[in-house]
Image: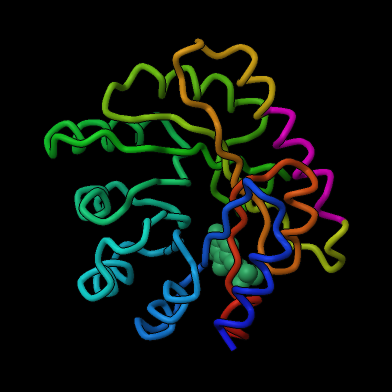
Amino acid sequence: MIRDNIKNILEELPSGIELEAATKKRSVSQILEAIDAGIKIIGENYVQEAQSKFTVVGKKVRWHLIGHLQKNKVKAAIKIFDMIETLDSVELASVLDKECERAGKVMPVLIEVNSAAESSKSGVLPENVEDLAGQILEYKNLKLMGLMTMGPFVELAEDIRPFFKKTKEIFDKIKQSAAANIDWKYLSMGMSDTYRIAYQEGANIVRVGTAIFGPR
Ligand SMILES: *Cc1c(COP(=O)(O)O)cnc(C)c1O
C-alpha cells in the first residue's frame, strides 16, 4: 500500500517537485518501505523521535526537520538533519549557527512562515519574514534556501490557497531582492489534502504523511 501510494503520487507530481514523506509516528519498517519505493526526503517533527529512527535508517535518505526546534535540542538535531525547515527566530538562528560552527557544518535552513498569522502556531509573521531573512544571511554556518509554511487548518482544502499564494509572494519578493549569491530555491508547502493546491501555487517540496502511510 505504501509502495502504491508513493508510486501514484510521484507519477502525479509535475517534474521538479520533490515528495517529502512526513514520518511522525511511523515505524522504521514503514520508513524503509517508503525509501525503497522512491522517497528521497523524510520529514520528522521531533528530534528525539528522529534520533532513534536515524540510528537504524541512517543516511540513505535526506532528513528534514519540520517541527518546531527547541534550543536545547539543537546540538542533537544537527547530527541528524540535512535541513531545518522551521527556523523562525533570530535567537534560534544564533544558537544553530554556533553549534554548526562547533560541528564544522553548514546547515541548509528554510524560514517557517505563519502564513495565517495564528497566535497558536509557530513560524514568523508574513510581515517579518524579509527582516529575519536578512538577519539569517549574516550567519555563515547557516545556508538560507527558502520558505516553508503549514497554513491554517481548513475544512475545505481549497480554502488554504490564499495562504499558499501569500507565502509564494513573499518567496518571490525575497528572490528578487536577495543578493545574487544566495541559493534561494525551496518552497515547502502542502500536506496530504492540499499538496495539489500547493504545487499549483509554486511549492517545490510537498510534505505528505497520511496519503502515503494511511491514517495515524
Ligand atoms: C504531519 C505533517 C505533515 C503531513 O501531514 P498529513 O496530513 O499526514 O499529510 C506535513 N507537514 C508537517 C509540518 C506535519 O507535521
Q: In the rendering, at what x and y percent does residue 20 appear?
A: 53, 60
Extent of the magenta region: 159-170
- Tell me the residue at 57%/53% (across/down): 18
Q: Quadrant of ligand 1?
A: bottom right
146 shown above or below 176: below
Q: Between residue 108 and residue 24, name the one nearer to us.
A: 108
Which residue is situated farthest in the bottom direction here? Answer: 1
Specify whether 23 is left or right of 194: left
Q: In the rendering, at what x and y percent does residue 92 appear?
A: 35, 37
Q: In the rendering, at what x and y percent does residue 170 appear?
A: 68, 28
- Tell me the residue at 44%/29% (across/down): 144
Magenta region includes residue 160: yes
Specify whether 76 is left or right of 216: left
Q: Between residue 54 and residue 34, name the one nearer to us.
A: 34
29 shown above or below 99: below
Q: Main secondary structure of the magenta part?
A: helix
24 shown above or below 43: below
Q: In the rendering, at what x and y percent does residue 99 appear?
A: 19, 38
Magenta region includes residue 96: no
- Tell me the residue at 33%/30% (across/down): 142
